[in-house]
Amino acid sequence: MQRWEGFKHEVKQEDSFGYGGPGGRQQQSRKRTYDERGHGYYEYREDKRGPATKHPDEDDEEYFDENLVVLDTYDCDLNFKINPDRLTAYPLTIEGFCFLWAGGRATHGVYKGKVWYEMKIVENVTVPHLPDTEPDPFVVRIGWSLEFCSTQLGEEEFSYGYGGTGKKSTSCKFEDYGTSFGPDDVIGCYINFDSDDIEMSYSKNGRWLGVAFKAKKNRIAGRALFPHVLVKNSSIELNFGQKDPYFPIAPGYTPMQFVPPADRVRGTPPPKNKADCEMLMMVGLPGAGKTTWADKHCAANHEKKYNMLGTNFIMDKMKVMGLRRQRNYAGRWDVLIQQATKCLNRLIQISSHKKRNYILDQTNVYPNAQKRKMRPFEGFQRKAVVICPTDEDLIERTIKRTDEEGKDVPDSAVLEMKANFKLPEAGEFLDEVIYIELQKEEAERLVKQYNEEGKRAGPPQDKKRPIDILKEGLPKFQGRGGFQNRGGGRGGGGSDAGGFRGGRGGSDSFRGGGRGGGDSFRGGDRGGSDNFRGGGSDAYRGGDHAS
């Protein structure tokens, strides 16, 4: 179910062509059951809507002295905002970002000696729209990780974090350690390579908390560990030795800044120009294997530090105690997914102003969405990666994913995507198109079959629009608004269609309308502009406590 919610937005952002494609008959949608709404569904909706891309005011990374140990503006989350001093930072908290973790590493790591740095929690960021039910809404983790680890500190191997709820974690295993901490507390972070095992320890406000982690040297294999911080709705300040410590440093430890340059390792530097950056746009139906390919490509190209852009990735950033929220979620799941999709749209806008490598992990089967999403990345190496497995493989993969994750994308939406699927071509907005499984000629034949299949499956007879019924010579309507003068003189746009029950909807209200704005084509609901299920408060009731 989870992935379907995001797809709903993705396809919605496309043109409003239905099963029939351009010039064809638009599908009459029906209200989906709760179980059919994964994040893929909301991505699907977003792609059909197709809003114009807006460019936020984002500055490219500024030059800094390579000899300084500071926060790395390249090796951090897009929603982790690092101030010009590169020692203070805070997360984005607008809209659904208040549910996301944000973090990053320092510019340099160490592999020998006994080293220290410290962090002060400056404040909890005021978030008026954060529900009271959100578990541990203000949390910070601090520690060390290898450079190729994700920014989710403590949730994978070679990533070690101590959190504000009094938990330590590595490999997503959480255990009690130390005490809780919050605003104005100062956490000292220590690493000792001189002991038999690599030891990582902490202090709180000058009080030694003891060894938290021991890592086998043969497992680390001489690689550098980097200072790493992860925050949720909290602002922080780091000190690597640029100023006097808040509390005395434990004997024998050296501030990161004073470690000789020869004993420090600089993290991967950012690309110098946009022309050195890649934007890979995945293209394929749900279940085709796009995410699997993207994950493998990232793992095989650590040096490129790809940033994943997809609703599934956003949901991973909303984890509670290392668990995705659907496993302990008691609130409005569809509302949460819509928030995640809005966050993704915002991150895509931000990313076009950052010199990094990206993988856009969505279906991207609609031609207008392909163009719209690639346009802001002009100057990047823009490539489409097409995943077109055989029909047999697609069915097998879809069944496997459904067994593992539940129903993701309703069959009707997949058919609509098939009807409108268009393979991208190199040219105006793409430099290259890469075919991973079926190559171009075979893929073209398969997609042609998809188009025909989707069009044949158009809306059933009882789902036709009022205007279609009138054209077939069925009983004439009376008055201006649909049958028996019940339709809505108030509905904007589509005036000859009226509406069965008289909507108050906006522009496309010829199918009856709720009180939402445009695209209120399912009628009856009272939600916002795309009221698939109607309104609802942001009632998030996660269960476990994050550290």
Image: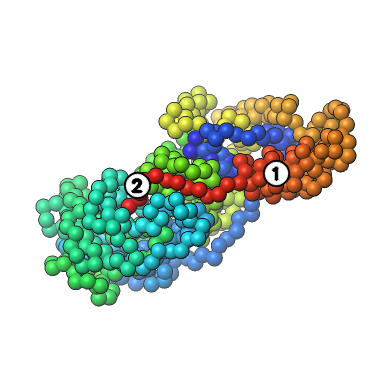
Residue at screen point 74% across, 40% down? 512
Label 2 crowd bin: few (<14), some (14–19), many (20+), radius 10 Å = some
Q: Which mark is residue 149?
A: none
Residue at screen point 19% across, 71% down? 248
- Which is more foreground, mark 1 or mark 2? 1
Q: Position of residue 114 (x, y in %)?
A: 16, 63
Indicate the quadrant where residue 229 lies: bottom left
Q: Which residue is mark 2?
A: 321
Q: Residue furthest left?
A: 196
Q: Is residue 234 shown to the viewer in this render? A: yes
Image height check: is 403 above or below 126?
Answer: above
Image height check: is 187 above or below 394?
Answer: below
Secondary structure type for disc 1: loop
Q: Is residue 166 left or right of residue 476?
A: left
Secondary structure type for disc 2: loop
Sooner in the amino-acid sequence: mark 1 or mark 2: 2
Q: Which residue is mark 1?
A: 514
Q: Amino acid at mark 2?
A: Met
